[in-house]
Image (tube, grey):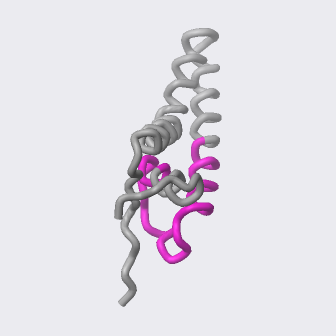
Amino acid sequence: MHTYEPTPTPKTLRCKLFAWGIGLGIWGGPFILVFLGWWKFHWSAGALGGLFGYLLAGIISSKMRQLSIPQDQREISFTSFEIAKWYVVRYLCCDAVR
């Protein structure tokens, strides 16, 4: 039986804030684009901005997932915040609490 590595937790406050900001950007970016497009232009621009943001968030989170999550754990479902934690700890070289 194979033991999976748990999701790492960043140790320093700077790394925690960075991981939280990346996770919030991936999760909330499409909503921000919907609101800005609707508020500044038209509801259809908000819908197109949301669609664009959703696709962009998917591409960015997929690339971060490929770079940082171990090969044998990539099929497990992770939230945006967990992907951001993996990315910050593994790829940006912040220390982790194990």
Image position, residue 84 (x, y; %): 49, 49
Q: Nearer the viewer, residue 86 or 80?
A: 86
Q: Residue at x 52, y 24 (%)?
A: 32
Viewed as shown, does residue 24 lie left or right of 93?
left
Where is residue 55 drawn, in percent x and y? 62, 42
Q: Is residue 2 above or below residue 26?
A: below
Residue range of the region highlighted in magenta in the rendering: 57-84
Q: Is residue 60 magenta?
A: yes
Residue at the far bottom in the pictured view: 1
Compared with 59, 22 (above or below) is: above
Residue at left offset 62%, top offset 61%: 67
Which quadrant does the N terminus fall into?
Answer: bottom left
Q: Quadrant of the C terminus?
A: bottom left
Q: Quadrant of residue 91?
A: bottom right
Q: Residue placed at 64% from the left, 28% from the top?
A: 48
Q: Position of residue 49 (x, y in %)?
A: 62, 27
* Left or right placement of residue 39 versus residue 4 in this view: right
- Residue placed most toward the observer, 72 or 88: 88
Q: Residue at x 58, y 52 (%)?
A: 92
**In the displayed structure image, the side of residue 46 where residue 84 appears, left or right:** left
Magenta region, main secondary structure: helix
